[in-house]
Amino acid sequence: MEWQDDGIVLSSTPHGEDATVVHLLTREHGHHAGLVRGGQSRRAQGTYQPGNLVQASWRARLADHLGQYSCEVVETPIARLMDRPDRLVALSAMAAVAQHALPEREAHPAAFEGTQALLAALEGEHWAEAYVHWEMFLLGELGFALDLSCCAGGGNDRLAYVSPRTGRAVSLSAGEPYRNKLLALPGFLVGYGGGGTGEVAQGLRLTGFFLGRHIFHPADRDLPAARHRLAERFERALGEGSGSKAGSDGETDSVDRPAGMD
C-alpha cells in the first residue's frame, strides 16, 4: 500500500540505532505516523523539524502497519523564526497539541489547512492571537466548539465570560455576580478588538480548560509540556506588567484571524 500527500511535521522520535518515528499532519490522511530509515542523520533531522511542510510518500505492506516515510522539504518555517523565541514556543505547542489531540489516521483536511494558516501567521504581527484562534478552531474541528454567538443567560450587552460547564458565552451583566466561577472571554475572540498579553493569556486559559476537559483528560493526559510553556510565558509577561508585549520578542500583539480557521 502506498500514498503521497502534503504533510506538516509534528514530531520525530529516535527509534533503534538510526531510524526515527515521524508524525505528520497530512492533508488527506490526517495525523499519520511512519518510520524513517536513517532519520537520525544530520540531513534527516533538518527535514523532520516540527512545523516543516513536506511532500510525503508513505509505504507499507498492509494498511494497518506503521509503514515507512520518505519526505522532501517544501518549506521550513522554523528557520524563519530562529530569532523569535516566543514564536518558536508557539510552534512547538502547536505541533504537540495537534499530535496528541487529533486521532491517528482520521482525515481532517480542515485541520491541515488551519494549521498551515497558523504557521504563516506565526511570522506576522498578530501571531499570539492567531494561536488562540487556532486552538478554538481545533476544538470545533473535533466536535467541541464553544458557543460565543450570544449570552447563555439572555443578556444583550458585551460578552465577557464563558461558562465552564456549557462552553457558552455569558454577558458582562449576567456573569458579573458569578465571575469567580466563569472563564474570562477575551474581546478579540468575539470581534471587540483588543488583544495583547492580557487577552492572549485569558484566551490560553480558556482554550486550555476545554482542551483538557474534552480531549486530554479523558485520555488520562495533561496538556503537552510545550503548551504549558507557552501559557507560562504569557502569564509571566502579564505578571511583570509588560503591557502589550507577548514575551521576549517584544512585539506588539493585536488581532488578525488567519484564513482557514472559520
Image (spheres, helix red, strand yellow):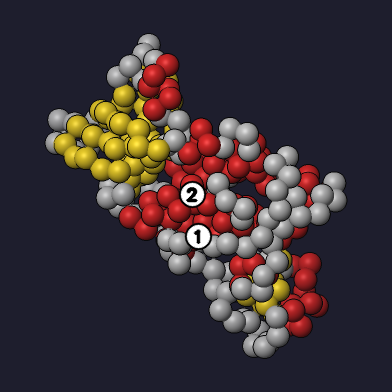
Q: Position of residue 68 (x, y in %)?
A: 25, 28
Name the residue: 30% across, 43% down: 6
Kindly identify which numbered label has been placed on residue 204. none
Looking at the picture, which amino acid does disc 1 mark? Pro
Q: Are marks 2 and 1 in contact (CB under 8 Å)?
A: yes
Could you classify mark 2 by the number of other residues whose Cα lies within 10 Å: few (under 14), some (14-19), or many (20 or more)? Answer: some
Q: What residue is disc 1 on?
A: 258
Q: Position of residue 128 (x, y in %)?
A: 62, 52
117 or 60, nearer to the observer: 117
Image check: 103 left or right of 64? right
Upstream in the sequence, badge 2 or badge 1?
Answer: 2
Kindly identify which numbered label has been placed on residue 120. 2
Looking at the picture, which amino acid does disc 2 mark? Ala
> For the C terminus, which image quadrant?
bottom left
> Most extreme residue toward the top, as rendered?
17
Image check: 124 left or right of 181? left
Using the rendered view, name the quadrant where residue 74 is placed: top left
